[in-house]
Amino acid sequence: RSSAGTRQLSSTKAAVSEARMPSLCSSRTSFIPGLERSTTKDLLGDPEIKIAGGFGGAMQTFDNTRPLVAAMALGLTRACLDTTRELLAAEGVEIDWDRPAHTQSAAAAQLLALEAEYEAAYLLTLRAAWMADNGKPNSMQASMAKAKAGRTCVDVALACVELCGASGYAERELLEKWARDSKILDIFEGTQQIQLLVVARRLLGLSSAELK
């Protein structure tokens, strides 16, 4: 909520209120892929509610929560890779970690490439989380981890569905569900585009007004 007559208007405000307050209106449940149990609530508001600093507080919170979302994405990515490896092994496709990818089957080579993407996202997430735990400024690292892990999750989930063929699309396996669920991990806590914008601002030393 933005008050009329203020110089700076922001779409993000923070407030805590009782669930049954007259000023609080609850809308119907929104069904969102990957977040099926989330509800949407509208704060109609009261002039007495103090909303100053809500946007800044939310931005600081993201430095801690973005590595967490990245870790969630890594968990789903790991599950996709492990399940795919098991399904491929059942069909006689073995992955040899000691041999170059180009000497193995196309499916094995692709899975090895996906594993490399997972490792890159994993290391970025560990660094961002470590910095958050130790009170170090990590806005850029948090966005790097979220951007990489979120996109990797989507790419790996879809690739694993394709690698497993009919089994990947069948409801008897969780791969098709994970592929549907993966996209939200690339969206919430800041979309891919927002993360790249944050990283660019930090690298170039530009403000939000200078780089939009």
Image (cartoon, rainbow, N blue to C red):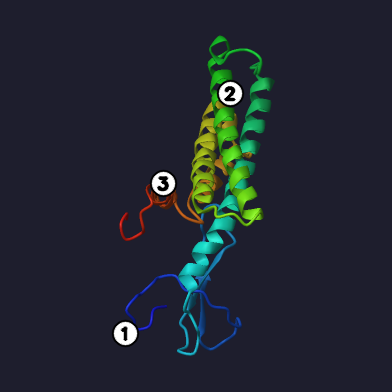
Dot 1: within a 10 Å radius of its alpha carbon, few (fewer than 14), some, or many (20 or more) residues?
few
Residue, disc 2: 112
Q: Along the line of sight, which residue is nearer the eye, 24 or 191? A: 191
Q: Residue at x 61, y 39 (%)?
A: 122
Disc 2, disc 3: CB below 8 Å?
no
Above or below for 82 versus 184: above
Q: Residue at x 36, y 59 (%)?
A: 208
- Dot 3 falls on a residue whose secondary structure is helix
Residue, disc 3: 203
Disc 3, disc 1: CB below 8 Å?
no
Q: Image quadrant for the N terminus?
A: bottom left
For badge 2, the amino acid type reads Leu
Dot 3: within a 10 Å radius of its alpha carbon, few (fewer than 14), some, or many (20 or more) residues?
few
Above or below for 106 versus 187: above
- Dot 2 falls on a residue whose secondary structure is helix
Q: Residue at x 54, y 50 (%)?
A: 142
Dot 2: within a 10 Å radius of its alpha carbon, few (fewer than 14), some, or many (20 or more) residues?
some
Disc 1, disc 2: CB below 8 Å?
no
Whether residue 173 is visible to the viewer of this picture, yes or no, is no
Which is closer to the viewer, label 3 or label 1? 3
Residue, disc 1: 5
For badge 3, the amino acid type reads Leu
